[in-house]
Amino acid sequence: MTTQTTNVEVGGTNWRRVTRHPALMEYRRLALIVAVVNLGVFVVGLRDGYWFNGSAFTLNLIADMALINLSLGILIRQQRVINALFWLATRIPTSWPLWIRWGAGKVFHFGGLHSGGTGAGTIWFGFLLYAMLWNRAHGATLPSDLTLGLSTAMVALMVLMVISALGPIRARFHNAFEKIHRFAGWTVLGLFWAQTVSITHDTGGQMLHSPAFWMLCLITLSILSPWLSLKRVDVKIEKPSNHAVIAEFDYGDTPFPGSSNAISHTPFGEYHSFANIPAPGRSGYRLAISRAGDWTGRFIDTPPDKVWVKGITTSGVARIEVLFKKVVYVGTGSGIGPILPHLLAKEVPNRLIWSTRSPRHTYGDALVDEIESHTENPLIWDTDKNGKPNLSALALQAVRESGAEAVIVISNQKLTRKVVHDMESLGIPAYGAIWDS
């Protein structure tokens, strides 16, 4: 076990420190693109009279824009769509130029389309409600009072969901955000169906002939699909310390490296996603869960015999390792969980830097021995003995010594963003979770 430090300095002032800053990450760029496109469509519509024909607002066109954006925001987060996006991104061979593979590895920033689409969709729905009220106030008989009431309730709940999802609010009231997102979202879906039926009745149309009806069917199936696979399964808990547990599952699902599953104590309770740790030649998988809040604290203090698993195995950040000839993994604490399956699979040559408190005492001898036997010259840094390391400097040294093409970071938000920014400022592709949900 190596515990040497390094004198390599990371930093400097160059254009990449600005362009690769976390504030300008791809997630936000995608959200900005959605906003700019919608603003452009709105301005063109004002100029050419699409939204207002001179005597009344054109409700169907406004409704179409609301539905398009909302559909984008919902469908892009569907688990099968996520897996398809990762599959497409990782088809690029390692013989292609590094800058192309660097960009393809940012596939996990697709959440920017979710936030951009749902935010824009909410604004369009608000515009639609205003247009409905304006038309009624100026003599129109439609839409009906029922349609107006349903639309008002929808917009109010959607605004509540958007506000609760704002970064500072979501971080401070995460449990409330989860409940609002789920239950308000289900309510909006129900209201959306009721509104569609009411509008169809108002206009005398036929639902089966409406594109909006079929898009709503697709949205509904997308939202329902994770719950259709809901199951209660046995779990075996190994507790090497009061800080962490290893949860082992074997119910017929052996996931792929770089994936995650969501678990909960109750079927409609608080779900948390953890990286799966499958082992070659063995069925099932493990999860490494460390104390990081109330939910994980209860899980460690009173280990359950059974948990609920929702949805399908879903691709995560580290899945993009196959885009590179060699990678450096940087992990802290239970961040070793998402990294370990890649060490075991040995699909891509790698180097490991793992910083954690008393690794053998906290996670057990078996896990540490497994790590050391499945990677070349791992650097396992005991923070209790050696203090906190300069992870950026250690990562840079590992890249230079090993010839790795990329760095993948699994840590807390502050450290992840720092190491990713430091590496990319030096022209090294780097990846880590972006905490977009």
Image: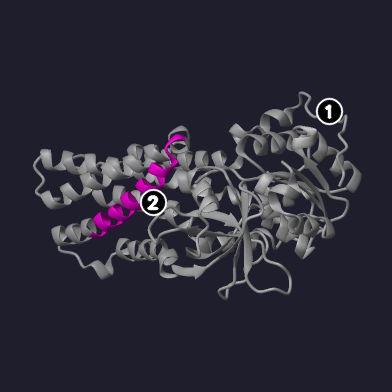
Instruction: Specify the farthest residue to the top.
Output: 13
- Badge 2 marks a residue whose secondary structure is helix
| Image quadrant where residue 45 sits | top left
Q: Nearer the viewer, residue 103 or 426?
A: 426
List x then y, in percent, for residue 25: 61, 38
The answer to whether residue 226 is left or right of residue 358 is: left
Q: Is residue 337 above or below residue 228?
A: above
Instruction: Specify the farthest residue to the right.
Output: 401
Q: Amino acid at mark 2?
A: Leu
Q: Amino acid at mark 1?
A: Glu
Residue corresponding to mark 1: 9
User: Mark 1 and mark 2 in contact (Cβ < 8 Å)?
Assistant: no
Q: Which label's residue is closer to the chain start, 2 or 1? A: 1
The answer to whether residue 199 is left or right of residue 217 is: left
Residue at the (68%, 63%) spot, across then down: 257
Q: Nearer the viewer, residue 310 or 432?
A: 310
- Badge 1 marks a residue whose secondary structure is loop
List x then y, in percent, for residue 269: 39, 55
| Image quadrant where residue 411 sits | top right
Residue corresponding to mark 2: 70
Q: Nearer the viewer, residue 178 or 201?
A: 178
Magenta stretch: give its range.
172-193
The answer to whether residue 288 is left or right of residue 220 is: right
Q: Main secondary structure of the magenta part?
A: helix
